Image: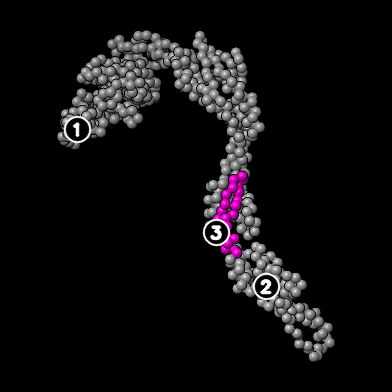
Amino acid sequence: MRPRIPSVKRIASIPPLALAGGALTVGVGSLYLAGLLLAGGEIDAGTTVRGVDIGGLSRAEATRKLERHLVAAGSQELPVRVGDRRGTIDPQRAGFTFDAQQTVDRAALAGADPVSVIGNLFRSGGAIEPVVHVDQDKTHAALGKLAKSLDQKSREGAVTFIDGRVEQVAPRRGYALDVDAAAGVLRSSFLGDKAGSITALPARETKPRVTAAEVHRAVREFAQPAMSAKVTLIAGDKRFTISQAVLGQYLTMQPDDTDRLTPKLDGKGLLAAPELADTLSNITSKPENARLRLNGDKVVVAADGKLGQKVTDKALSKAVLPLLTKSGAARTGELAVREVQPEVTRGNAAQLGLTEKMSSFTVNFEPAAYRTKNISRAAELINGSVVMPNQTWSLNRTVGERTEANGFVEGIIILNNEFAKASGGGVSTMATAIFNAMFFAGVKPVEYGAHSFYIERYPEGREATVAWGSLDLKFKNDSGKAIYIQAESTDTSVTVTFLGTPRYDEIKSITGPRTNVKQPTQKVNTDKECVPQTPLEGFDVTVERVFYNDGKEVKREPFHTHYTPRDEITCE
């Protein structure tokens, strides 16, 4: 029904000047009044919000209608994508909400000014943008969570080798969501009325350096020829081959400064490859130091040293790489073998300072098959060791892990203050002999540790034990000259002698009294691996190492040792 426009009362008399000056004012005012009366306080006809028609409704009616439609629209997830990955985002969790009341107020106010009111006499209402409230903290949190699932790291084009086959890795662009910029785009998407449309969120793009074209080139020019056949190497009178599968384990292609894939061969890894171990052992050999012996207290050369032969990782890489792009007989090349001089020879022994006995110490032990075997093996590995000035010698590094493969057998050790069985039992006897040889040679201890409880065959406070991976015996050669270690064993003893140039005329050991003495307890052990144990008191003791030159004391060094009681253990 068209609203009725009430008649305007006629003014009886208007002065001419007032009429002339106010004619326009009266005309505009009449139109404004007519527009207000036409509107009647309702929303303009034809007014819509996101396609919802609220024209001609009162504010309350328009608000209720919008609430129904906007709540439904505001709960729909928004499809989005970052790069080529797609996902959805919940607008409510992202902090976006419609305000129906303020949207209606905006629609009403849009026609309240004089220009709009008069204009409404000649047109209908239009589309009104809904009022949206945004919780920025929720928006950034939701976008941050979205980034974790849709961000994509760039991937370089690559070529790999697996079991002698060539594998190509296609390059891929990377995208990282720009959270700050995406917040505005997401708001616009929420305001829009494009059901089902996917919003592309702004992201920082990362392009891979290595292109697909470069991958194809690298495969064609290098990778495929490299895996086409074995390579053959000649070292002296020895000849051996390396298969594609082994080559592929240590071969890579990496981008250079121009993003071109270039081959890299891990020569060090290839040199240590288990498949080449037997072959290289027939080609290479360690140098052997001259064997020294004592004539009285003076050192003489018993046998000269021997040259060793070595293949370096650089030589292996240099020999193999050029062959990989060749075919047929051309995939055969020479491998350079280098001679290695021994550290000690007949000619340089005296120059190194290996001229006389520095110290010697013998440890006697009760015969036992495991003890004799393990001490003999340790002596074999240690004998002939040369320690250059300022170098640190390590028993664990020299002897290696005490395993069956390394020549050791099961024996008795101390574990958790009790005797127990383990591989390498008895090697502590060798450690004690070396500790005392080091002690009386006057060189610097770096790492050492005594047994947890005292063992009667060792000098108290002047003995050592070792454990693979936890306790080592190390000393630094601070004598100024080289040291040569002799280690010799019998079924009941081991003797360690240091040959070199003594810095001191004499070194003595002074053992202090036992203090903090504690008595052992009695225990019963029912474990089938139990080893019986006799009791012995625990105590603390200090041993002083005293240095002399020209008959005068130069300095003293204390060595403090704490022994726990050795409990009596009966096996049942």
Confirm whether the magenta stretch covers residue 72: yes
In the image, residue 52 sits, relative to residue 88, either above or below, namely below
Task: Give the residue number, with chain letter if any, for mark 3.
Answer: 92
Q: What amino acid is labelled 3 in the image? A: Gln
- Alpha-carbon neighbours of circle 2 within 10 Å: few (<14), some, or many (≥20)? some
Residue at 73% over, 70% down: 124
**Disc nearer the start of the sequence (2/1):** 2
In the rendered image, the quadrant that contains the C terminus is top left
In the picture, the quarter occupied by the N terminus is: bottom right
One can see residue 133 in this view: no
Q: Is residue 149 left or right of residue 32?
A: left
Instruction: Using the image, tell me which numbered label, if any, was put on residue 135.
Output: none
The reply to whether callout 1 and callout 3 are in contact (CB within 8 Å) is no
Mark 1 highlights which residue? Answer: 526
Label 2: which residue? 56
Q: Pointers 2 and 1 in contact (CB under 8 A)?
A: no
